[in-house]
Amino acid sequence: MQFLDDSLLPENQEKLVIQVAPYGPQWLPGDFPEDIPVTMADQVQKAVDCYNAGATVLHLHCREADGTGSKRLSMFNEMIDRIRTACPDMLIQVGGSISFAPEGEGAEAKWLSDDTRHMLAELKPKPDQVTIAVNTNQMDISALMNADDIAGTCLTNPAMFEAYRNMYFECGPVFMEEHLKRLVANGIQPHFMVGDLSQLETVERLIRKGHYNGPLVLNYVAIGSGAAGTHPADLIEFARRVPDGAVLTIESVMRNVAPFNAIAIALGLHVRVGIEDNLWSRKGERMTSVQQVEQMVRLANELHRDVASGPEAKAIYQIGTFYQSTDETLRKLGYAPNRQPGQRGVPRWEYA
Ligand SMILES: [Zn+2]
């Protein structure tokens, strides 16, 4: 993204879209009983509470009545339907891993098969977005967590810790190309979860080769392991490398979330919060998802950055918009055109 002389002035920035991830598929209900909803009614109410606090994009996973992460798409359908009714202006973004929780003690934490994840394109009612990870990679969610961060949670159980430490996901070219095709065919916007520049380049290649024609809405996922860490220079460089037409949200982990999001709000980017990423306020003090949303609203207010309403977030994310061709996509996103045979120098758009 380019930053002009006046790009840091809040009246020139897009209104802030706050994503919230309040379900925390890696946690068990006992890890934070005050803030991990288990019944369907409570899961729906959590979405409503986050929306009322200022969050406009809901990152959704689903729990069974016994508290385990649901892998049944019928549960997702029911939850999406009930949240649509309770909170019609909240954007629903389904987590593309579905649930990576281990089936039992000592089992692996793993992403579901390609075919199961492809079924997310068939959810009814359809969500606004499904997240798509990029490139096959490790996802050691504990990489940037210390003993204080996991105190009082299931990750203090060595078997669970090992299960999550050794998690990886498969999102190779065959999966990504097919998944994008299915999502777009069903009018669902892919939300790209991008951990570093090589993953961003993979997304650009998919677009340049015609595998995706639509808005580029993405998270910079700075959770360590197979993704970026918390060096601010990497965040800034990532923002610089994202094309002007993209919508960039910053996501990190545990108590890095607030400082990273403060940078994001100042730069005119967007933020993600919620107990899937972070459990803490001050060191040693738990913080609910709603409290995390409220903190983002306070930070935005202090910097005079407006917070987007639900309909405004939908417009910023360009939900329902798709493009007709690779050229249109590259142009709308602000990428250079593809090189024509024999063309020298940097390809540029011709304007009459
Ligand atoms: Zn998730």
Image (cartoon, rainbow, N blue to C red):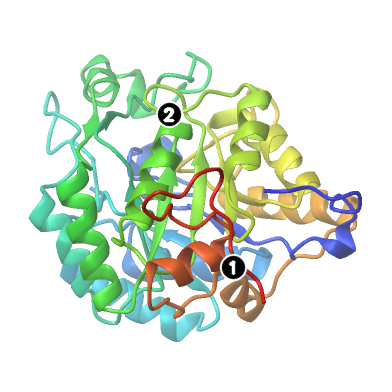
Residue at x 24%, y 17% (from the top left corner): 162
Corner quadrant of residue 20: bottom right
Disc 2 residue crowd, few under 14, some 14–19, many 20+, Cα 10 Å: many
Residue 316: tell me if it is visible.
yes
Front residue of 280/231: it is 231
| Residue at the extreme front of the image, as rendered | 342
Residue drawn at 48 percent across, 20 percent down: 145
Q: Position of residue 229 (x, y in %)?
A: 52, 23
What x and y, as percent, mark residue 264?
Answer: 71, 44
The residue carrying mark 1 is 56
Residue situated in front as seen by the camera: 62 or 244: 244
Is 281 positioned to the left or the right of 30 in the image? right
Q: Of helix, strand and loop, which one carries label 2?
A: loop
Instruction: Determine if the C-beta at disc 1 is less than 8 A from ligand 1.
Output: no
Task: Tell whether 343 sits left or right of 271.
Answer: left
Measuring from the top left, give residue 17's x and y in whole percent: 65, 62
Residue 46 in view here: no
Residue denoted by label 2: 227
Q: Quadrant of residue 179?
A: bottom left
Question: Is the C-beta of the residue carrying label 2 under 8 Å from the nearest atom of ligand 1?
Answer: no
Q: Position of residue 9 (x, y in %)?
A: 90, 55
User: Tag on residue 346?
Assistant: none
Give the mark nearer the N terminus: 1 vs 2. 1
- The answer to whether residue 248 is above or below residue 56 is above
Q: Could you tell me which secondary element the residue under label 1 belongs to?
A: loop
Q: Residues within 10 Å of mark 1 (few under 14, many from 20)?
A: many
- Front position among marks 1 and 2: 2
Where the C terminus falls, by quadrant?
bottom right
Q: Amino acid at mark 1?
A: Thr
Q: Of residues 92 and 163, which is closer to you in this image?
A: 92
Q: Residue 155 vs residue 84: left or right?
A: left
Amino acid of disc 2: Ala
